[in-house]
Image (cartoon, rainbow, N blue to C red):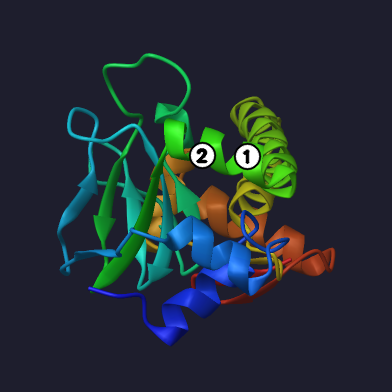
Amino acid sequence: MKWTKSQRAVLAETFLFRGLDRAQLDAVLAGRAPEVFARGQEIYSPHRFRRALGVLAEGEAVVEKDSGAVLNLLRPGDCFGAAALFCPTETYVTTIRARGRAAVLFLTDEELTAAFRAYPDMALAYIGFLSGRIQFLNRKIDSFTSPTAADAVWNWLVTHADEEGVAVAAGGLSALARELNIGRASLYRGLDQLEKEGRIVRTGATIRL
């Protein structure tokens, strides 16, 4: 299976490849084909995964806890699998499942290393990505120690918002309350407070910072 025009366009705009021209992207993709997953199919799980960075070229995927609670929604251009790269590990941190038909580019640590040597801008982009993950984890820690429900909700929103400042509680607000370990009433009070302060605009489970 070859890369479609739309899949290539998504990859070209992904942070990892944004600094490459068309010929360079062609060189990285040479000999590689998209791996396609059907709706509901497991891509990664704690005990069944590959040591590779995955780049979602088409479709969406959900990131789940062992309990089935949805942690995040991956969209075209998003990456996953960094926790399994460049270090020995026997387990992966979450389960990733295709939400619908999904196409993924996988790059092993050896393939990434070769690409970084050929295209240093890719290495810098990846370092920036990892720095962002560190900031995400720090904010996640803050959310566990937040003194109020509004603070807990705000920290969750900041860590889950996309580049346009939009966060989606994929499992609904009840699931979000369980994830934050607060009651639904506390969650709604926190959201109401953030809205009154002008920090968010809410439409159902979709929230814009």
> Which quadrant would the C terminus be assigned to in this image?
bottom right
Residue 182 makes an appearance in the image: no
Pick out the residue farthest to the bottom: 5
> In this figure, what is the number of numbered marks?
2
Quarter holding residue 152: top right
The answer to whether 71 appears left or right of 103 in the picture is right
Secondary element type, mark 2:
helix
| Percent x, y of residue 29 | 44, 61
Mark 2 → mark 1, Cα distance in angstroms: 6 Å
Name the residue tied to disc 1: 116
| Amino acid type, callout 1 | Phe
Residue 15 relative to residue 88: left or right: right
User: Which residue corresponds to the image point at 75% horizontal and 41% vertical from the top-left?
Assistant: 124
Which residue is at 68% across, 62% downward? Answer: 20
Q: Looking at the image, which is closer to me, 116 or 152?
A: 116
Q: Are marks 2 and 1 in contact (CB under 8 Å)?
A: yes
- Mark 2: give few (<14), some (14-19) or many (20+) Cα within 10 Å: some
Q: Where is residue 134 drawn, in percent x and y?
A: 67, 30
Q: Nearer the viewer, residue 64 or 61?
A: 61
> Residue 65 at x, y = what percent?
30, 39
Circle 2 residue: 112
Residue 34, image quadrant: bottom left
Asked which secondary structure carries label 1, the reply is helix
Q: Position of residue 80 (x, y in %)?
A: 44, 46
* Neighbours of disc 1 within 10 Å: few (<14), some (14-19), many (20+): some
